Amino acid sequence: MKTVSIVNMKGGVGKTTLAVNLAHALSARHSLKVLVVDLDPQFNATQCLFDGEVYVEGINSGMKTIYDVFDENPPDSISMVGKPEQKKISLDSISPWEADAGFHILPGNLELHRLDMGAGQGREFRLKKYLGEIAKLYQYDFVIIDTPPTPSAWMTSALLASNFYLVPIKPEPLSRTGIDLLRGVINRCSENYTHTIDCAGIVFTIAEVGTKVYAETQSFLSGQAMWRGKIFSGYIPKRTAIARAQGEQGLILDGTDPLSKSELIKIAEEFLRRVGHGS
């Protein structure tokens, strides 16, 4: 099982779009077993796959979310003296949800903000431990983690659980800011935790090929030693239909835009060439 974090320190770059659609392409086109982990407290990946009613029904029926991975001692019941009794959750009891798209997802949860992820808590290793537990049960080929666009304990947790990171970039002048911040986050994680994580590459998203800003962004990244040779040939084009479909739990391969579909297929194939076929 290989674990890949989708990361960028800038919002609005199509991070969630890449995460869920890459997972779908690997599952649908390559018959691989894929888990998406929604680690962004805004839980956009979850909303791309389930409407609000289905999500609430799942929670009410006792289904678990990413919150349960990090909350080791949730209140379980009320004791005789009126105090909450705490019962540890077994990580292997936290079952991912099955998405209609043919892969699994561990949904996000807005309640993540309530958890104390301060230094010394040890929670930054919980996701890695959880993935180790479920690897035995589900035999996933890939885990794809959708991360928040900010340096945080959640980002650190994702990186520590990952073998690779993949960077979606919207070709624009401000993309340089996000990529510079990301470089620092990756380096600090490697140094502070002696953790090795490899760059799977850079994918241009919301892209308008042939424009000046596209060429300038490509040239800038190619001139940086850390990113040289990392740019995927496939890209996710700028399409209002993609954003509209996501709001209705639609995915690129299920849509009607031929360019979006062909480019996503190229991304998935290049991804497999760069990181291998799992296991």
Image (spheres, rainbow, N blue to C red):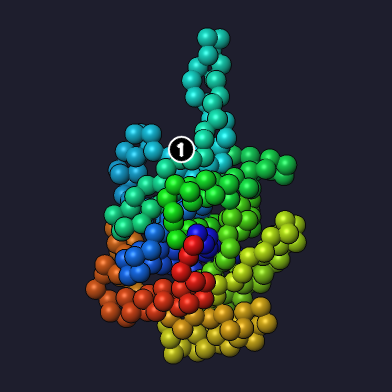
Task: Please provide percent x and percent y for residue 208.
Answer: 42, 82
In the image, taking residue 129 as reference, residue 206 lies left or right, namely left
Judge by depth and name the residue closer to the eye, 46 or 27: 27
Judge by depth and name the residue closer to the eye, 271 or 119: 271
Residue furthest to the right in view is 191
Asked if residue 241 is positioned above or below residue 83 in the image, the reply reads: below
Residue furthest to the top in view is 80
Asked if residue 44 is positioned above or below residue 12 in the image, the reply reads: above
Q: Amino acid at mark 1?
A: Ser
Task: Please provide percent x and percent y for residue 216.
Answer: 56, 87
Task: Please provide percent x and percent y for residue 259.
Answer: 32, 80
Asked if residue 24 is positioned above or below residue 134 in the image, the reply reads: below
Determine crowd level at label 1: few under 14, some 14-19, many 20+ residues with C-alpha closer than 10 A. Answer: few
Does any portion of residue 231 appear in the rendered image? yes
The quadrant holding residue 189 is bottom right
In the image, taking residue 195 as reference, residue 163 lies left or right, namely left
Residue at 56% across / 9% down in the picture?
81
Residue at 58% across / 47% down in the picture?
129
- Count all numbered tags in the image, as a single digit: 1
Task: Please provide percent x and percent y for residue 39.
Answer: 51, 52
Residue at 31% across / 38% down in the picture?
57
The quadrant holding residue 234 is bottom left
Residue at 63% across / 65% down in the picture?
197
Does any portion of residue 220 appear in the rendered image? no
| Residue behind mark 1 | 93
Q: Secondary structure at mark 1?
A: helix
Asked if residue 165 is positioned above or below residue 139 in the image, the reply reads: below
